[in-house]
Amino acid sequence: MTWEWSHTQDAYDNAHNNLWGLDRETLQIIWAEWHSSEYPDGGEEREFDVQLYKFALSAVGLIDTELLIDFIWQDMERNATCDNGGYNAWCCPFGCHTVSFDREVETTEQERAE
């Protein structure tokens, strides 16, 4: 069972910062998962297209890390799904990649750049 996000702004900020703590390969996989899944016929369950996933993985290397994270975060906000209990935000459409709403890493790439 999943929940819809209903957290404080601090929790969303933590999840966003934790997303920055993921390695680039994981971010590329997450981006490819978002771009290879869809709601068929207006249904509520996503379907995964393996061919589209392979294509997305081959193209994602051209995307800058900051832009990649922005794309993923937009999809995360649009989906607004977390695990039962509300502890982890889903980074991908299927919940196999998550980040905590609590602060996980001390310093992210984004914070170091600022």
Image: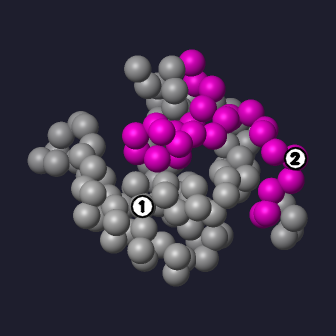
**Is residue 99 within the magenta segment?**
yes
Where disc 1 sits, the SS reads: helix
In this picture the colour scheme is one colour
- Cα gap from disc 2 to disc 1, whole angstroms: 27 Å
Residue 106 is tagged as 2
**Point 33% across, 71% down: residue:** 55
Q: Amino acid at mark 2?
A: Glu
Where disc 2 sits, the SS reads: loop
Residue 32 is tagged as 1
Left or right: residue 4 compared with residue 64:
left
Q: Quadrant of residue 27?
A: bottom right
**Point 34% across, 66% down: residue:** 54
**Is residue 41 within the magenta segment?**
no
Residue 44 is tagged as none
Q: Residues within 10 Å of mark 2 (few under 14, many from 20)?
A: few
Q: Can the viewer see residue 12 in this picture?
A: no
Q: Can the viewer see residue 89 in this picture?
A: yes
> Magenta residues?
85-110
Q: Residues within 10 Å of mark 1 (few under 14, many from 20)?
A: many
List x then y, in percent, for residue 53: 34, 61
**Magenta: main secondary structure:** loop
Q: Nearer the viewer, residue 13 or 53?
A: 53
Cβ–Cβ below 8 Å for labels 2 and 1?
no
Q: Nearer the viewer, residue 6 or 60?
A: 60
User: N-terminal of the two: label 2 or label 1?
Assistant: 1
List x then y, in percent, for residue 114: 86, 68
List x then y, in percent, for residue 88: 60, 32
Q: Name the residue at the left extreme.
A: 41
Q: Amino acid at mark 1?
A: Ala
**Point 58% across, 24% down: residue:** 86
